[in-house]
Image (tube, rainbow, N blue to C red):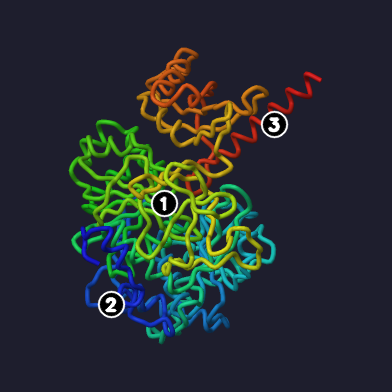
Amino acid sequence: MQAMQDYQTAYSRFDYATVVRPRLSGTLDSLNACVECCDRHALPGRIALFWEGRDGSSETWTFTELQQRSAQFAHFLTAQGIGPGDCVAGLMPRTPELLITILGAWRAGAVYQPLFTAFGPKAIEHRLNTSGAKLVVTEGANRGKLTDVENCPAIVTLGGRRGLGIERGDFSFWSELEKHSTHFEPVMRRGDDPFLLMFTSGTTGPAKPLAVPLKAIAAFIGYMEDAIDLRPEDAFWNVADPGWAYGLYYAVTGPLALGHPTTFYDGPFSVESSCRIIRKYGITNLAGSPTAYRMLIAGGDSVIECLKGRLRAVSSAGEPLNPEVIRWFAQNLEATIHDHYGQTELGMVLCNHHALKHPVRAGSAGFASPGHRVVVVDDNARELPVGQPGILAVDLKQSPMCWFAGYLDMPTKAFVDHYYLSGDTVELNADGSISFVGRSDDVITTSGYRVGPFDVESALIEHPAVIEAAVVGKPDPERTEIIKAFVVVHAKYRETPDLADVLRQYVRKRLAAHAYPREIEFVAELPKTPSGKVQRFILRNQEIAKAQAAQVSAA
């Protein structure tokens, strides 16, 4: 799909056969993810990975090298009796060995399951036991967690950069690879067969398992082309961890399926490391989360001096992108940053596309990705008109690129008639774009008004004292709920009652008399999931518990 073509043309003329088929080398009757993401791009010297260690060391890996190493890993899996449809888990940081594990599992026809390295033993145990994984690959820093995992499968450990410090009973990653041939014929599967086993982030409840079918690769490529606008001349970095959907879908599968190098940084996100990597690798196309971008903004002049004019396209996902972040990137870095919306269950389905021309409204999540029909519905799955808040839904009858079919062995209320209900509250705009209001259970009811936390949080963040904010409804006998904000302030400001009053009036003037925080609590940090999403429900539950305790005391 050519960059910068008109959105309406791309959307209205979308045809599965003519648009999807050219994106894949195989057919829906014969697909292998390792072929799509590695083998077909294995030309002499063609780079697949730029790897940067936290200590400043670096490596480059070609598609050919990954092809050979993935073949060795596939032979090892076969020797352990692991084959098509079996699950292989990875508990590893962003290293070349992680890519070898993923690609090797795919080559053998197996299903790869990511485990985020910040998980503790119980979170790992839940995921491994639910998936029935036959093998888990890890490294020295995370190996100890598996000791406390009940019914843990066989373990392959990368102790050092080349397998030092392997525990008794473990397979040694590099020792096992060296035993096997660098050729392994890929096991072909069908488009509906799974190649990833994902778990939801658990923002609103226990993490739920879902299988991602091979045909989803075409949708991932579409996102890279249309929304990310990844061009051959770009240097691309998606800072998201492959332990989560956005990183695994769009830092691994998407770019590699296009034959484009991806960038791994094996270290924690920081302003210094981000600036260094962007400059060292000449990054022009950047993807990440609002949390990461707010950290860059907090870096101030040093970030501006380092990055101004270097980034052509910047994409944001994970939670809504505040308008202030959009303005800051444009004014200070001369970079266009666009907001994108998706879920583990869907991939990215609502975007302000970098490569397709359409109106871009600050605060809007954008337009439906080609191949998807995204609508706003009420509680009875009836489509709503412009200006009425409702639930974001995907019309499955008219969304050939939507691949989600439900959770594994779990009932769900997410499907009503021919709609998938996302659980997020949104509003349709007159231009056809859709604006995010909040998770359905995050929306605040105060004095008869429904207020989304996003608008209040965005207004707070526009004040120079505020780095981050989370807004929830606090139980109130007169108003049902009042708006309460939890605010992280910049180090240059004091957390005083006067500042809280200034912030309250600041928001009131920008929004409405009913849509400002009547209470503000200053905090050192906000509760977040390991993937960086703010967990408003924790703050809301704290306020409910306080209100209940107060009622008991009064009685």
Badge 2 crowding class, 10 Å Cα cut-off, few under 14, some 14 to 19, many 20 or more, is many
Q: CA distance from mark 3 to mark 2?
A: 58 Å
The residue to which callout 1 is attached is 341
The residue to which callout 3 is attached is 545
**Residue at the location (54% across, 34% down)?**
450
Point out the image quarter for the C terminus. Answer: top right
The residue to which callout 2 is attached is 42
Which circle, 1 or 2, is nearer the viewer?
1
Q: SS at mark 1?
A: strand
Q: In the rendered view, does 336 fall on the left or right side of 543?
A: left
**Marked residue nearer the N-terminal end (3 or 2):** 2
Which circle, 1 or 3, is nearer the viewer?
1
Image position, residue 416 (x, y; %): 58, 60
Q: Is residue 1 visible?
A: yes
Q: Is residue 28 above or below residue 341?
A: below
Query: Which is more toward the observer, 483 or 284?
Result: 483
**Residue at the location (51% across, 54% down)?**
117
